[in-house]
Amino acid sequence: MTEPQHSTAQAGAGPWPAPAADGPLDSLTVVPGSKSQTNRALLLAGLSSGPSTLDGVLASRDTMLMRDGLTALGVDLQDLGPGRVRVSPPPTLHASPAPIDCGLAGTVMRFLPAAAAIAPGRTRFTGDAAASARPVAPVLDGLRQLGARVDGDRLPFALEAPARLPGRRVTIDSSGSSQFISALLLSAARYPEGIDLRHRGGSVPSAPHIAMTVAMLAERGVVVDQDDEDHWRVEPGPIRPLDAVVEPDLTNAAVFLAAAMAVGGTARVPGWPERTTQPGHLFLDVARTLGADARVADGTAVVTGAGPLHGAELDLHAASELTPVVAALAALAHGRTVISGVAHIRGHETDRLAALETELSRVGARIAQTDDGLEILGEGPRALHPARMRTYADHRMAHAGALIGLAVPGVSLDDVSCTSKTMPDFPSMWADLAGSR
């Protein structure tokens, strides 16, 4: 078993006893805004032709890194109230005088360099120690094809943008992350020649996130032509300013809904959109497949755990961010679960497949990696035992550990502060959920 890289998200990290539920839940959790939508909306507002006001903006480490990076490139951001931000773009972006810190945020390390390619001059990008293991080379390769110069293929690196990008045709392999495609599409209208972008390689994971990018561009007047699933074209032109509202983060919502499956009872998350491009909405289908009752009633997602969970075969290629929570549920279920289509999450905040194998084994689960996922032989929560689980500076690993701890008293996490990446209030929100009856 190969252990994943271990790093600390930020200073002040320490052991956290995971709250255990005393019985079935009756919870209602208001989940903050989507990180994926927030960072796309902030970037598009910063590239637009006029000011925009955004509501429901997530305040987290990843979104603050995006805000700081945009500010370094010349964008003005003003807080008007909780979750409400006024974004005023400059006439043209400028190179950052100081390195832009990407932390461990995939959207920042991939989206901002693509924007910096229209800011003439040299901009340097840095990140957390573990960030160098996150793949970014396909984006940088695409920027080179457009005419930028980049001195490396992983963080840290420096990008030298010319006065005018001469290129248009780009071919990259985006089988490692849909964010490689999204990064280039988000800034494409601001490139002098637009972009003619092709993907060559295995299937692109998390395709709903590309659909999210395309939909958000369309709302701002940018047309993405697509004649097949691996070919996108964007013509040069303005990005229209737009006052917009960010949806709740449905992937973050998954762990709160999963809680009712782990210990019984009912969990609710209000504000569930009727239509969405967020792949997190697929969790309701997963919940039903594992044996729970899951539905949306009057805009609220409701999951009820009415009995023991059972194993299932689950292809999570379109919603791979759900893998840690689903793997934890599979460890609490009875029977064999096979999660497939997620080989690419070995390149997420940590090697998530290795991390899940290591940490779920630590509490007694029978789990093994496959070529593209995990096989878990669940024997119910009574087969698991207390242990201190590591999070590897990965918020999704913390969610998985908290879920196990809800059903297995005595579990602790080495660091819950990594949840600040997308949900700074997670520890208190989880404690409230655990105490709901």
Image (cartoon, rainbow, N blue to C red):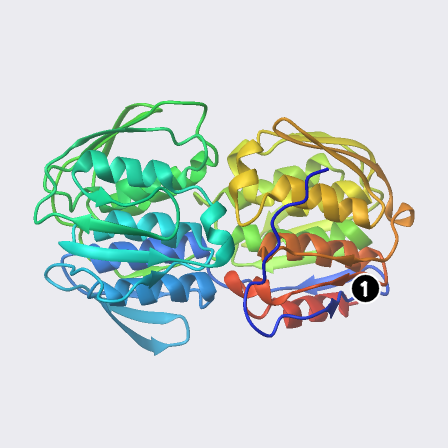
Q: Secondary structure at mark 1?
A: loop
Q: Which residue is mark 1?
A: 20
Instruction: Please identify the quarter of the rendering in which residue 164 is found.
Output: top left
Residue 234 percent across, percent down from the top left? 19, 35
Residue 66 percent across, percent down from the top left? 35, 61
Under mark 1, the amino acid is: Ala
Q: Quadrant of the C terminus?
A: bottom right
Front one among 103 and 48:
103
Instruction: Judge left or right: residue 406 versus residue 171.
Output: right
Instruction: Please identify the quarter of the rendering in which residue 186 is found.
Output: top left
Residue 289 percent across, percent down from the top left? 70, 34
Height in image: 77 above or below 167?
Answer: below
Whether residue 378 appears in this view of the structure is yes
Whether residue 242 appears in this view of the structure is no
Specify the farthest residue to the front.
Answer: 151
Instruction: Judge left or right: residue 324 versus residue 105.
Output: right
Front one among 287 and 345:
345
Height in image: 73 above or below 328?
Answer: below
Mark 1 Cα-neighbour bin, 10 Å: few <14, some 14–19, many ≥20 = many
Instruction: Please identify the quarter of the rendering in which residue 314 is found.
Output: top right
Residue 270 percent across, percent down from the top left? 56, 59
Residue drawn where x is 86% and y is 65% of the image:
22
Specify the farthest residue to the right.
Answer: 382
